Image (cartoon, rainbow, N blue to C red):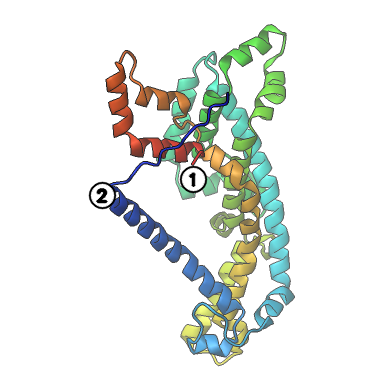
């Protein structure tokens, strides 16, 4: 005889409904703050430049045209910046993920002597740095100026990402598994490449996303270390387009509005941000898993609702009083 589970719907009180409504209102407000500027930029890039100049464009194109994109793609500096940015992003992300993994794994091992000391040194750099001028002098002494390595090596490892990856190794990779592999004759490199990395797909995807987005959007290191325009990343090209347009408008230039107007700026913004936005949906499921590193899962949930040694009435009371907490845990674990 099969047992059928009946789900009882919990009736929400008036206060809970009001709270839920406020949460939805806040979320809708945040979505509007994020989406409306994007819609304005996209619609402006497809609009007639004169309509955009007159302020007739809001969230829908006026005088639909591809002229701005034609001018953007005819610009050789855009394509050169694209090529440079792709090289910097791919190479920089690979180097950053490898170095972060190599640093995070030993720091997650309980048998690594002095790991707290090394972790303290890493955390210290989050609050105290050498500053911009000493960093520039180091890059100059290493003869890295006007090379792509000046944009990759100084920011190769993020302490924040290192902490996230170390926490993932500690909470996801059982130490007993590492001990078993050691007893079977595996050295540290074999354990790392054959056991740890195959189990670390979510965090690797998160690191690729974090480092890739940061490298793609980076422009300030190029401003400091690169003077050769042939090495400019795409964001530096975008910066020049924005600055030149602002200068022309402030000077009251009577030049071609289609070239130096807002439409060209908007089209360049869309071209510069579209690739990294298209990448996110493919990594979203891994991103959600990775950002929940160290989150309380089933054990913490049971500890919350069932206090050890508590009697049945007390447990029922804790369950009854924890409806919102149960929903929180369910959303956290992705079961609701």
Residue at coordinates 47% horizontally, 30% vertically from top-left? 294
140 horizontally vs 246: left or right: right
Mark with earlier residue (2, 1): 2
Residue 331 percent across, percent down from the top left: 46, 41
- Report which quarter residue 204 is drawn in: top right
Relative to 51, say whether 137 is above or below: above
Dot 1 corresponds to which residue?
134
Residue at coordinates 56% horizontally, 68% vertically from top-left? 239
Badge 2: how crowded within 10 Å, few (<14), some, or many (20+)? few
Residue 28 percent across, percent down from the top left: 41, 61
Dot 2 corresponds to which residue?
15
Relative to 213, say whether 36 is above or below: below
Badge 1: how crowded within 10 Å, few (<14), some, or many (20+)? few
Residue at coordinates 54% horizontally, 13% vertically from top-left? 111
Residue 164 percent across, percent down from the top left: 51, 34
**Label 2 – label 1 distance at C-alpha:** 56 Å
Indicate the secondary structure of the residue bearing disc 2: helix
């Amino acid at each position: 005889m099969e047992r059928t589970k009946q789900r009882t719907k919990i009736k929400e009180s008036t206060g809970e409904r009001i709270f839920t409504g406020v949460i939805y209102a806040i979320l809708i407000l945040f979505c509007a703050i994020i989406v409306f500027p994007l819609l304005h930029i996209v619609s402006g890039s497809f609009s007639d430049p004169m309509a955009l100049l007159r302020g007739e464009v809001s969230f829908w194109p006026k005088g639909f045209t591809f002229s701005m994109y034609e001018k953007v793609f005819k610009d050789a500096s855009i394509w050169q910046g694209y090529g440079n940015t792709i090289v910097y992003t791919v190479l920089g992300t690979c180097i950053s993920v490898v170095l972060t993994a190599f640093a995070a794994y030993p720091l997650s091992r309980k048998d690594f002597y002095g790991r707290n000391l090394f972790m303290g040194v890493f955390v210290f750099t989050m609050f105290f740095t050498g500053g911009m001028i000493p960093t520039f002098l180091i890059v100059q002494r290493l003869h890295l100026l006007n090379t792509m390595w000046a944009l990759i090596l100084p920011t190769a490892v993020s302490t924040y990402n290192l902490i996230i990856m170390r926490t993932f190794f500690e909470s996801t990779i059982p130490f007993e598994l590492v001990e078993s592999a050691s007893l079977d004759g595996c050295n540290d490199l074999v354990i790392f490449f054959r056991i740890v990395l195959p189990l670390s797909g979510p965090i690797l995807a998160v690191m690729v996303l974090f480092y890739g987005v940061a490298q793609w959007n980076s422009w300030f290191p190029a401003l400091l270390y690169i003077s050769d325009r042939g090495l400019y990343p795409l964001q530096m090209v975008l910066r020049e387009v924005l600055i030149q347009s602002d200068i022309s408008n402030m000077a009251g230039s009577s030049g071609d509005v289609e070239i130096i107007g807002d439409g060209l700026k908007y089209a360049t913004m869309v071209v510069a941000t579209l690739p990294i936005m298209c990448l996110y949906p493919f990594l979203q499921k891994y991103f959600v898993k990775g950002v929940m590193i160290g989150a309380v899962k089933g054990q913490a949930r049971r500890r919350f609702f069932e206090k050890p040694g508590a009697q049945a009435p007390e447990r029922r009371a804790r369950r009854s009083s924890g409806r919102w907490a149960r929903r929180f845990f369910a959303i956290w674990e992705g079961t609701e």
